[in-house]
Image (cartoon, rainbow, N blue to C red):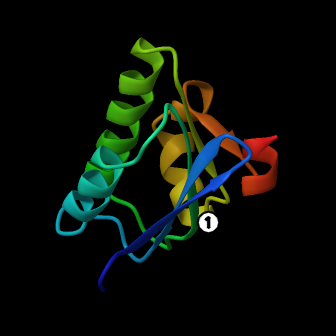
Amino acid sequence: MDLQVRSEVRGGWTVVAVSGELDADTVPVLSDHLEETPGQRVVLDLSGVPFMDTTGLSLMLDWHRRLDVVGGRFRMASLQPSVHKLFRLTELTEVMDIHGSVDDATA
């Protein structure tokens, strides 16, 4: 499955909407997109991601740390149950900034 990524600015946040499976084959697509994303306040809309493996998880952690170091914010929103389960199992729900919706994340 191809990964589709698009961005828009909402209330001072860059919202990056991702659709497709996020795995070792597709993570570079999202990584490249994030590298070109302006601003230091980023929300990933993961409502269109039914599956994420550990390479996707690693990318999320990397961006969380990168933006934290420069005083930015990295949030995730609208995780599907299988993706949210990955964060719960790795106990990253305590570390990552996860919201139920993009509206909540950008508020």
Q: Residues within 10 Å of mark 1 (few under 14, many from 20)?
A: some
Q: Is residue 41 above or below residue 46?
A: above
Dividing the image into 4 quarters, which one contains the C terminus? top right
Picture coordinates of residue 101, whole percent (x, y): 76, 56
For residue 48, say whether it is visible: yes
Left or right placement of residue 52 versus residue 41 in this view: left
Element type at marker 1? loop
Dividing the image into 4 quarters, which one contains the N terminus? bottom left
The residue positioned 37% from the left and 46% from the top of the image is: 57
Picture coordinates of residue 93, whole percent (x, y): 60, 34
Left or right placement of residue 63 versus residue 46 in this view: left
For residue 101, say whether it is visible: no
Foreground: 10 or 23? Answer: 10
Left or right placement of residue 49 versus residue 76 in this view: left
The residue positioned 40% from the left and 13% from the top of the image is: 69
Picture coordinates of residue 42, whole percent (x, y): 54, 41
> So how many labels did they put on this image?
1
Foreground: 73 or 85? Answer: 73
**Residue at the spot of label 1:** 80
Q: Is residue 13 above or below residue 93?
A: below
Tell me the amino acid under the disc marked 1: Gln
The residue positioned 27% from the left and 52% from the top of the image is: 31
Q: Is residue 84 above or below residue 38?
A: below
The residue positioned 81% from the left and 47% from the top of the image is: 104
